[in-house]
Image (cartoon, helix red, strand yellow):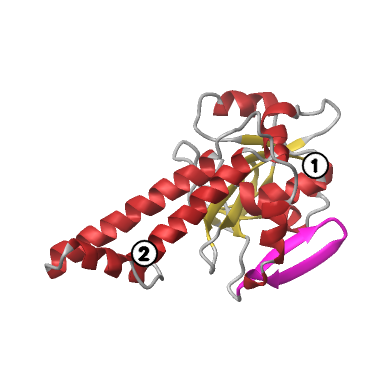
Amino acid sequence: MTGSPDYLPPAQAKPLLESNGFWVLELTSFNVAIPARAGYWKMAAYTKGHVMNSSDLRHIEAENFISRYEAKYKREAKKFEERLGIKHMQALDAAAKKLGMERHHYFLERIKGLKSRARHFAIQEERIRCAMMVQPAKNRHYYWFHAALGLDDDGDLMTRSVACCKTTWLGFVGEDTTKEIRKGALVNPDRVRDRLKDKPHSLYVIDDIGDLSLWIMVWGGFALVPEDLVAESDFLTDLIAPQEYPPNSP
């Protein structure tokens, strides 16, 4: 699971962006695949909801990704500088080109945009509500997911893949004991919270379809999603269905 925390075993992740450049979104009663470059869903996600000026909640997943991205850029620049014996600024330009930009200036602009995005979601009411105020309902059953953030073709920070964090073992693939068949398992929300206590990650409790779409597309991080909402998303329903998993998955 790309970008997943190191204290969780790897799980079977499903990409949110198809190889043909289309976002896979199957929520409520509609199934749609829209061009990643169309910008409509990204614009809606960035502008949806209200901001809370009196409070904020750091968008840790975004901040962590930005830090890793900057570190990768510096490593690439250092490699170019040492291998080619070029000046530091030339090495930065070379690293930028390797990451899909013309020169160092455009990398700085990209980082500026990513940090602006993180600040936007740090004060977004829906995100703060799901992370701090919504409590798991006693009459609902929950699945536990993780959404890994990454960059899309436009250089915007969006969810790249989603994985189910808890599965149940169903058997092996034929006689091959190195391949397991598993399906998503319901979890105890209190135990999930205890496991993530004091960890530098967000945990969202999703309670409506609008917040589900925001988490699955742009918030990233961990989420407790009720069984009835999972049933409204073909994407998540496929993710919890029986499938082949790596050995010793969670």
Can residue 171 be seen here? The reply is no
Q: Give whichever of discs 1 and 2 has the lower sequence position.
A: 2
Marks 1 and 2 sit apart, C-alpha to C-alpha, by: 46 Å
Residue corresponding to mark 1: 227
Where on the picture, by quarter, is residue 187? top right
> Residue at position x 78%, y 54% from top?
233
- Judged left or right of residue 197, residue 231 is right
Is 92 situated above or below 190? below
Q: Quadrant of residue 91?
A: bottom left
Front one among 165 and 243: 165
Eyeballing the image, is 102 above or below 164?
below
Kind of residue indicated by mark 2: His
Query: Left or right of 209: which side holds 116?
Result: left
Furthest residue in direction bottom, as rendered: 20
Quadrant location of the C terminus in the rendered image: top right
Q: Where is residue 213 in the image (x, y as percent from the top left)?
A: 73, 51
Name which residue lies at 33% across and 50% down.
Answer: 71
Quadrant for residue 188, please give it.
top right
Q: Does the magenta stretch include residue 30?
A: yes
Report whether residue 228 is seen: yes
Q: Answer with left or right where residue 111 lies relative to residue 167.
A: left
Q: Residue at x 36, y 64 (%)?
A: 105
Q: Give the range drawn in magenta.
A: 21-36
Observer-nearest residue: 156 or 28?
Answer: 156
- Please tell me how crowded label 2 is: few (under 14), some (14-19), or many (20+) other residues with Cα within 10 Å: few
Image coordinates of residue 179 in percent, x first then y, are 54, 55
Q: Identify the residue position indicated by label 2 in the image.
A: 105
Residue 53 at x, y = what percent? 66, 34
Residues under numbered marks 1 and 2 in contact, where contact means CB atoms less than 8 Å apart: no
Answer whether residue 238 is magenta in the image: no
Where does the image place residue 110, in percent across and percent down from the top left? 46, 60
